[in-house]
Image: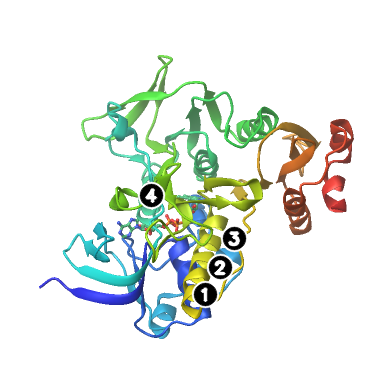
């Protein structure tokens, strides 16, 4: 018989937000048996960014339990035992296929039902697949994507099986850049393909991108820009052998990794909850249009106070902080206490090869590049300011120390007057250190 269970609080999704929500529930006080985390994945919440980085390293790769949450933000590592010690039910390998917000009931693929008083939606995103667009040959073997740990295991197995082979990375965003680097570190012959004029166009300026493209080229990664994959060839076993590009050229491939973006997983709630900008609309406490239902992480479109705007953010720092904010709000409401407003400053980062960058704020307006952006320097350190209406709104820094990264965060938060752009360029990081 299918099981039926009731919990006071259910977090749907055992990813980054799910794990940080659990920790916050414990901090705020939760009784054994009150909280369940339901997740499609077979493992306890972990720091997802590791999957495109240390998880795929050729030497000493990261493996669970090493990177369970909350180690990514310097916190305690929550092992599966932690959840049982705290009386939190971790319901793994369980996909919810139906959510009825009116009756407060979730139904799993196996027919189990879970009822709740308070629901936190933390379902994250799914990857966009080329087969979604009917790209010919896109279902061939060894055309891979990366979102969950199972995907990373498949990619790891393909890297082992195709040692010294050819890899094509489709997509020039941060996933494409991180994966190209790690595939190269595994001694594959790597080509990156993307349609835009430069990599990471949603954040990088042409000048920032020029540094990374040259650095990657120096490492032996080939970059093909301004074209897209329009089809794949496969052999008699169904294994991919080549990528056809829309400029008519063909790239041989033993492995193809596609990183062309994600979609927030909101389908279970369509028509039941207000949506905006592709996500589930929330207030500053991450409560949705349905009282008692919260949405956090990648799926939430929330008021971003600092820019007087509503936005959806697909980055790990926000997934952690939004989960904590929602739980504080839930517990605050129960206690009749107001919680401080969500003061979120956008923060993204990436690491590849021996590079590491951070970005804080908003990438709008004019830009000023500063520092040493020579890709052949022994230790390149450079950055960019974004200036709008005379104020510095965003800062990017490659190769910064912890203190320098804190300094750029302070700038993005304080939004100081920029003065002359020439001066700003000359001053470079000194400007940030003065704020
Ligand atoms: P997720 O962490 O994706 O968790 C969602 C969970 O919900 C998953 O476990 C999923 O299986 C589960 N789920 C979904 N639907 C159901 C269902 N119907 N039933 C049951 N369970 C369900 N951000 C950065 O800022 N810097 C980085 O360097 C960086 N690197 C990344 C590298 C990779 C490979 C990926 C995929 C993402 C990276 N990100 C990075 C983005 C960051 O990891 C996400 O923004 C963050 O994980 C979002 O947290 P979340 O809890 O909303 O979703």
Task: Look at the numbered disc 1 and give the secondary structure of its residue.
Answer: helix
For disc 3, the marked residue is 342
Binning the other alpha carbons within 10 Å of mark 1 as few (below 14), some (14 to 19) or many (20 upward) gives some
Using the image, determine if residue 130 lies above or below residue 345.
Answer: above
In the picture, the quarter occupied by the N terminus is bottom left
Q: Is mark 4 within 8 Å of ligand 1?
A: no
Q: Which class describes the residues within 10 Å of circle 3: few (<14), some (14-19), or many (20+)?
A: many
- The quadrant of the rendered image in which ligand 1 is seen is bottom left
Q: Which residue in the protein does label 2 denote?
A: 71
Please report whichever mark, 3 or 4, sits nearer to the chain's N-terminal start: 4
Which of 241 and 311 lies nearest the eye of the viewer?
Answer: 311
Give the quadrant of residue 216. Answer: top right
Label 2 to label 1: alpha-carbon separation: 26 Å
The residue at which mark 1 appears reads as: 332
Per the model, the C-alpha gap separating discs 4 and 2 is: 34 Å
In this view, the residue in front, 104 or 13, is 104
Label whose residue precedes the other's in the sequence (1 or 3): 1
Q: Secondary structure at mark 3?
A: loop
């Amino acid at each position: 018989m299918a099981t039926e269970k009731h919990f006071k609080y259910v977090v749907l999704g055992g990813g980054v937000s799910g794990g940080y929500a659990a920790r916050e529930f414990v901090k705020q006080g939760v009784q054994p048996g009150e909280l369940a985390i339901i997740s499609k994945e077979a493992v306890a919440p972990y720091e997802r960014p590791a999957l495109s980085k240390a998880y795929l390293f050729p030497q000493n790769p990261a493996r669970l339990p090493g990177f369970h949450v909350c180690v990514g933000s310097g916190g305690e590592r929550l092992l599966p035992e932690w959840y049982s010690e705290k009386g939190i039910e971790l319901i793994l390998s369980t996909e919810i296929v139906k959510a009825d917000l009116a009756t407060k009931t979730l139904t799993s693929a196996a027919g189990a039902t879970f009822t709740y008083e308070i629901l936190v939606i933390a379902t994250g995103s799914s990857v966009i697949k080329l087969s979604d667009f009917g790209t010919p040959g896109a279902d061939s073997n060894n055309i891979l994507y990366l979102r969950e740990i199972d995907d990373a295991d498949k990619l790891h197995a393909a890297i082992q099986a195709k040692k010294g082979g050819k890899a094509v990375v489709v997509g020039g965003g941060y996933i494409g850049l991180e994966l190209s680097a790690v595939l190269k570190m595994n001694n594959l012959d790597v080509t990156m393909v993307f349609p835009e004029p430069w990599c990471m166009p949603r954040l990088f300026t042409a000048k920032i991108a020029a540094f990374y493209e040259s650095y990657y080229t120096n490492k032996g990664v080939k970059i093909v820009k301004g074209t897209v994959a329009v089809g794949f060839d496969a052999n008699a076993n169904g294994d991919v052998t080549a990528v056809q590009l829309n400029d008519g050229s063909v790239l041989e491939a033993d492995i193809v990794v596609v990183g062309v973006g994600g979609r927030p997983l909101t389908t279970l709630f369509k028509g039941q909850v207000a949506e905006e900008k592709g996500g589930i609309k929330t207030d500053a406490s991450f409560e949705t249009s349905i009282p008692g239902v919260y949405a956090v992480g990648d799926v939430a479109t929330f008021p971003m106070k600092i820019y007087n705007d509503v936005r959806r953010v697909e980055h790990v720092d926000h997934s952690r902080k939004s989960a904590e904010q929602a739980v504080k709000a839930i517990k605050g409401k129960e206690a009749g206490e107001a919680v401080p407003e969500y003061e979120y400053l956008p923060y993204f980062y990436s690491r590849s090869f021996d590079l590491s960058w951070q970005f804080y704020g908003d990438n709008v307006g004019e830009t000023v590049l500063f520092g040493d952006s020579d890709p052949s320097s022994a230790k390149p350190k450079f950055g960019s300011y974004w200036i709008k209406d005379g104020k510095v709104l965003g800062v990017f820094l490659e190769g910064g120390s912890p203190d320098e990264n804190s300094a750029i965060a302070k700038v993005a938060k304080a939004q100081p007057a920029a003065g002359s752009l020439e001066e700003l360029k000359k001053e470079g990081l000194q400007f940030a250190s003065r704020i």
